[in-house]
Structures are given as structure tokens and as C-alpha cells.
Amino acid sequence: MSAKLSALLSAAVVFLAGAAQAAPHYKAQISRTAYGIPHISAADYGGIGYGQAYAFAQDNLCLLADKVVTVNGERSKYFGPDGVTTVAFAETKNLEADFFFRANLDVAALKTNFGKLSADYRNLVLGYVAGYNRFLRETPKASLPAACRDAPWLRPITLDDMLRLNEERMIQASGGAWLRQINAAAPPTLKAQASLDAPGLPIEPEQFGLGSNGWAFGRDVTANGSGVLLGNPHFPWETTNRFYQVHLTIPGKLDTMGVTIGGAPGMSIGFNKDVAWTHTVSTDRHFTVFELSLDPADPTAYFVDGKRLTLATKAVTVEVKDGAPQTRMAYASIYGPMVVMPQVGMAWTAKTAYALRDANKNNVRSGDTWLGIARAGSVEEIKAGISKTLGIPWVNTIASDRKGDVLYADITATPNVIADLAKTCAPPSGVGPMAARARIYVLDGARGACNWQVAAGTPAPGLMPGEAMPAMIRTDYVANSNDSYWLANGRAPMAAFPPIVGPTANVQNLRTRSGLMEIEARLAGTDGLPGKSVDPAAVWAMLYANRNLAADLAIPDLLKMCAEAPSGTSTAGKDVSLVDACTVLSQWDRRMNVDSRGAHLFVEFWRKAERIPDLWATSFDATDPVHTPRGLNGIAAPKLKTALADAVELLAAKGVALDAPWGEVQYAVRGDQKIPVHGGEGGDGVLNAQQSAWVGSGLVPFHGSSYIQVVTFDAKGPVADAILTYDQSTDPASPHYADQSRLHSKKGWVRLPFSAAEIAADKGLRVTTISE
């Protein structure tokens, strides 16, 4: 080789090396269609995460930045100790949240588990970090949202932040729900901390109305012979549990659309060209409590199989705005953190203490689980994937596919505690039965054999194997509205599984009953709609009927009681005329539409009436669970009239007319706009569930129907209609702060553009390419 040729080759190598070094590590195209929905396309998973985070930050920067403060235990530092935040769907003081997250998130373990995941998911997360930071880095301060542009807590994020955010989501129905009980746990010798407030039972999802509806219809009952899916999660309208619409595409590898939880890379609920899926909160308990037998000489020492062990201790310090740092001790056993709940006998004494074991602690498997669902080609693939990873934390999975199969699966990270173990391992104190009313399973921690049973092949020791959990694949329908697996198909009740998974042959909530009534009426052709088959239009009609089942069950008998004696005594002891109230209820259409008059009167009445003992004339019958219990019990008449009198008094105090249209009473506030919201309390049996709280003279929604999707398939691909009821953006300056709210108010929805041609045809298409 000549010297000249050698020099040319060397120069070429240097040039190519420089070109390779200069090539962007992350690159994504963001194409926004109507209502600000971003379609992210990239050549790899890093690029997808990069574009997804950039788009999310454009719409919800302050929302995510605020949550990063929470999971790092820094709320007291920036906002003061007495402010409140949301953890595990419940409000808690900043100081309590800070101590909990600083004491209980194990970032080292999370990193170790993260390193075991697929390269695809790891790159997705790392790209997400880069995309968020890119937006923050390049956006002029004046262009940042007013809510956080000057905030000292607005900063770039790290992988550690992402792992903390994911952990907070995983433990929302387990360790996070025990936040106060964990924080207050201290040996009797430490009086100051032991006296901390630990009120009530753990905040379990079903106790404050968190729910969802999921229906999937198979080829035996659909008009087109393909699957049809309704996804109707009832989730908070605030915090990072808000959903965000997005479409993610890697040519030949990934093409999925739907919603993700705020700050979560990938897809939470959605569809691809072959499958559609949704989730509903399950009845599984994702934790157990262990009773520890203590050393009488030392309340921080305990025995397991006769061996003396010492509790791990950790001094946790929290910075406080305008105040001195505060320090508490955190205590943990081999099972997990210590807890106290004196209300059911679980106090830390000189002899006995209690510890919580959490099936979702350090669960980062969920990332690969949902990535697998998004890439699945059939419901069989979804079932196999969630069974293998056991990464679904606390929700059922409902899915349909192109060929018309449907899936219901309660396959989650659940303790492997069978009924015999729960019985033979009852703790010596007898506290188990006292806690059973909340399905809190208490085991004897002094016997190693009472720990969760280890099954071969599970990704974490002590989890119930996927094949041992409830699941069915059918060709007619499956449905769930947060009751157990038992009536996932009303025609084929499932046999009992271990009680920790959920009960059977029990009273079903009114949404479950209403949904099964609607489904069976549709299949019988008795619902007033044409034919007997299911198509997307029929599903929307069923959901948006806004039927109040409690009203259908109660009002006929209530009106008879009114006719007998049209007055009642309020809780305050005042005699109240019920003539006008009963007239309004007799004329109400028993729907929760924006033009329904009198709906709010029934809502306030039922809040108290549903808790009356011996309410129903016909008791529950396990052979007819959809139609029982029913009929108001005559002996409850005085209490029912008191409930109605209280409702009349409350509305008078609010200055709200008894016959006001529902849309003038329940509304979303967007700036100076009051946007009417249809739907009502899930506890009333309203499928389009909407929980609201009084703010002045109006009911303002705080959670309920959030993202709604109805999906089927044709020869070209998925056909999907959807609505994000509270909009894409939390920034009042955004054009997408109220646009879907207004559409939802009119019972509208969006035909989602999925193919490249559909996206390109959008009249307001905006395309941005980012790289670094």
C-alpha cells in the first residue's frame, strides 16, 4: 500500500469516526393532531422515550416536577410541613409524605432490579430522562408555565427520580396506603413518635371510590366478528395519576396508542393493530401483616423460629422550610416496615409488634410487562406475558383482539397466601379476626413457615404464580367494575380462589350490577337499540345512558313513603316538608345527564341512605346477584326520610334549587369557565362514574371517568374513539387545557388517527423533530 493511499484511508477512518460521534444519540418526531395528541415516532426505544417526555413536559411540566419533589421527600423543604399532597390517592401532610418516602424507597435495590430489565425498556426510561431535560434546558424561562417557572424545585430529572416515581405508583394499593401507620410505628419507649396520629384503617382503593369499568366483547356477540373493548378507568383528575394521550411508533417494532400515567414511559391503557386493553382496580390484597413476638427485655428485638433478630433502624431527617430539620427513626423487620393500627388491636407493646410485607416493593418488572402488552398480537400473548412477569401491581386486565377473543385476568403481584395458610398461621394474639373486616391478613411472624409460600418460576419469591390466579379467555364477553373475579362473566361465575385474591358469592357493587344489566339487555335486544349485537356505537350508548341504578331501585318505594307522610325530621331535629322534594324526584328521569333535573337531590339523599342498616326489603341472593338486594325496607322509612330531609336542608344552605339541571350543579372549572359534566357517583350505580365535592354552590369533579376508549378492528387496523375528559394539559395557557372538557360535556369523543395517512390528513397537524 502506498503512503498516499494509507494516508487517505486513515483520513477516511478519522472522518467516519467523527461522523459517528456526531450522530444524535436521541432523535424523535412529534406530530400533534387535534386536541394536542402527540404521535411520537423514532427509530429506537431511546428515541421514543425522548419524544414522549418532551411532549409531556410541553403540556404538564409543573405537574411532573412537583411529583419529583414528593418522591424525593422534599415537600417540607419547599412548601412547608403542614401543606398537603397526594400519596396513594389520598391527601397527606407534606411532612408525613417526606418521612415515608425517605425511609421506605430503596433506590439501590430499584437500580439493581432495573438493570435486570430488557434493554428496550431501560433505553425507553433513559430516553425519557433526556427528553424531559431537553425541554427544560432549551425552553426560555419566560415561556415556562407560570406555576413553576420561578420555583427553586424545578430542575433536571435523573434515573433515580424515574425509579422513585415508578415505585410510588407500584405501592399505591399496598405500602403507600399504610403511610400514616408506618410513620407512627415506634417502640413504646419512644413516646413522642408512638403518639403520632394513625387514624382509621388503611386507605384501600375501594374505600374511597377508586374504580373503573372494563368490558370486552368477543366474536360471538359483536357485529363485525372482531373484538370490541370499552376502557373506562375512574382515576383522579389531579396529580400524576392523570392520564395523558400519546401514540408511540417504532417502525416494525412498536405501534401503540392510548394513555400513560403522568411521568410513566410507555403505554398504560391502549391498543395496537391487533389488541386493545384496559385495567380496573382489583380486589387482591397486595400485602400482609406479620405479628412479631418481641423480646420482653427489648421491644426492638423479635424471634423467628426461636432465633433472636433485631429490627433495622434508620434515622430519617427531613428539611423544613423556615424551620429546623426534623428527625424520626424508621424501623423494619425482615418482612418489611413496622406498622401500628391500634383501632384493630395492632399496637406496638412490650410483647407484640406488627410489620408489613409488600408484594409490590421494588417492582420495576411492570415496565417490561406493559411494554409486552403494547407489543402483543393476541389476548393469549397478553395473558402469557403478565403471568410470566407478575409485574401488574394492583389492577385487573381486560382485553380484546382482532380475531374476537376476550380476556379477563386478575394476575397481579399478590402474596402467595392460600386459605389454609391464613387459617393455620393465625397470630397468637387473635388480632386476625378483628382486622378481617377490612380483609387485612395477619400472619404469625414468629414462624418461618407462615411467611409467603415460594413457588417455582415466579420472578420474586413469595408471589402467587400467574397460573394460580383468576383468568378466562372467552368469545362472548368479560366485564369488571371493581368487584372480584367472581362475576367477570355473569353467565359463568368463577370458582373460588384464595381469599386474599377476592371474595365470591357476595353482594356486588351497584356499578357491577348496572353493567351486567346493560350487557345482558344489549345481548337480548331489550335495551331499545337496534339488533342484539355489540358495536362501538352501542357501547357508547350504554355508558352514556348515565342511568342511576340506585334511583331505579329506591325511588318507587321512597315515593310511597312520601305519600304516606310527606315530612321528615332532619339529623339536626328540624321538621322538614318533603312535598317539593318528592315531587322533584317523581319527575326526575333518573339519569345523570346535564339537563336532568333533581339528580343532585338524589345524590345527597343517597350518600346517607345507602349506609342505613337493613335498607333492603329483599336480601342478597347468590343465585341472583345482579338483581339483589332490592326494594326499600319499610322499617327504614324514618331514617330514609331523615336522609331526604338532610339533603333538602343542605341544598337550601347551598342556595341550589331542588330541580336545578345537573349540569348547573356539577361542572369542571377551567379558568373562568364552568363546563357542565355529566355522569354521577359510582356508588349510585352510575357507570359513567364521577365523584365530585362541593366548592361553594357547585359540585366540582375530583375523580371518575377520565380516559374513555372504545376500540374495535377492521381490515385496515384499529378503529378507536376516545375522550380524555379533563384534557391533555394542566397549564391554563395551553390551547388543550379545556378543549376535550367541552367536547365531553356534549357527550362527544375523538376518532383517533392511527395510520400514517390518518395522521397526515389532520388539518391542524404540527410536526417537530428533536435530536441530541
Image (cartoon, rainbow, N blue to C red):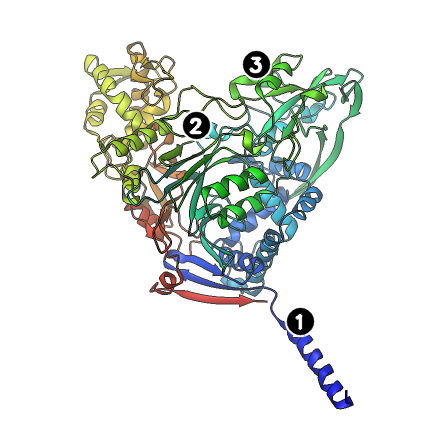
- Residue toward you, 102 or 145: 102
What residue occupies the far top of the structure in this picture? 635
Q: Give the distance between the C-alpha atoms of the residues marked 3 and 1, in whole angstroms.
A: 65 Å
Secondary-structure class at tag 1: helix
Q: Residue 21 shows which numbered tag?
A: 1
On screen, 249 above or below 197? Answer: below
Question: Which amino acid, mark 2?
Answer: Asp
Horizontal side of 753 relative to 423 (left or right) equals left
Of residues 748 and 18, the one drawn nearer to the viewer in this rendering: 18
How far separated are the C-alphas under marks 1 and 2?
A: 55 Å
Residue 325, image x and y in percent? 70, 40
The residue singled out by tag 2 in the image is 483
Which circle's residue, 3 or 2, is located before the other in the chain? 3
The C terminus: image quadrant? bottom right
Q: Residues within 10 Å of mark 3 (few under 14, many from 20)?
A: some
- Which residue does the image show at 46% across and 43% down from the upper left? 238
Q: Viewer-nearest of labels 3 and 2?
A: 2
Give the percent coordinates (x, y) of residue 506: 42, 19
**Position of 398 relative to 184 (above/below):** below
